[in-house]
Image: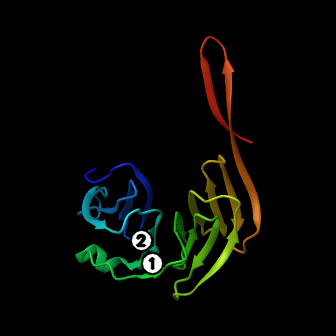
Amino acid sequence: TNGVVQPLAMAIDGLGDIWVENQFTNITVYASLSVYAQPNTLVQTLTVNPPVYGVAVAGDYLAYGNSNGTILDAVEPILTSNAQNGGSYGNMTGVAIGSDNKGNFYVGNADGSVDIAFANGTASTFLFLSFAPTGISVDNVRGRIYISNGPGNSISVYSTAGALLKVIQSKLVCLRTTDWHCWSVVF
């Protein structure tokens, strides 16, 4: 698809548009031109202050991290005229961002903290990790927050109250026959 260059984060909004963060440089938005078509038409490229980190969409807002902190921009002005006029949470680096169905953003920061930027414009600390998160996803049905630790090869599962429920650890297992065969196994 035109504009995708080493995609590192992506989000899908309520209209089915796909928002892609490309190689820490920009965010491209893809949509379908008809209701039944695949969303593969480039409709907008957001040029923002690099580096660009995580990206998430909730309700009418886009959140992404960059050198100025975590930025919240209204979706409609971006899609119609590339107008960026959102607020900034300067203390949040936004290296990983996930959103819930209430319009809140879970923002993972380089220092290992995870904050919640609420839909009403306020923010609070959710929890502190021993690692910088590489991805955050929210399971609205089960009320869980999944936080990935890329270098640690694991995913931590938290309740929305911040209680650690489980750590999913993946280990690489290799067997030797005539050739090397390796599988990723979850323990």
Pointer 2: what residue? Answer: 14
Foreground residue among 184 and 139 = 184
- How far separated are the C-alphas under marks 2 and 1? 7 Å
Q: Is residue 41 above or below residue 151?
A: below
State the image coordinates of residue 115 (x, y, percent, origin top left). 61, 74
159 left or right, relative to 178: right
Q: Is residue 49 above or below residue 187?
A: below
- The amino acid sitting under disc 2 is Gly
Q: Is residue 60 above or below residue 177?
A: below
Total numbered labels placed on residues in the image: 2
Tell me whether circle 2 and circle 1 mark residues in contact (CB < 8 Å): yes
Q: Quadrant of the C terminus?
A: top right
Disc assigned to residue 113 = none
Is any part of residue 60 visible from this angle?
yes
Foreground residue among 164 and 153 = 153
Which residue shows up at 72% across the image and 71% down it? 162
43 left or right, relative to 6: left
Question: Mark 1 packing: few (<14 Cα in 10 Å), some, or many (20+)?
Answer: some
State the image coordinates of residue 108 (x, y, percent, origin top left). 58, 66
Q: Is label 1 in a helix, a strand or a loop?
A: loop
Pointer 1: what residue? Answer: 59
- Check the image and tell me how it is coloured: rainbow
State the image coordinates of residue 79 (x, y, percent, origin top left). 28, 73
Which residue shows up at 58% across the image and 67% down it? 109
Q: Nearer the viewer, mark 2 or mark 1?
A: 1
Which residue shows up at 38% across the image and 53% down it? 23
- The amino acid sitting under disc 1 is Gly
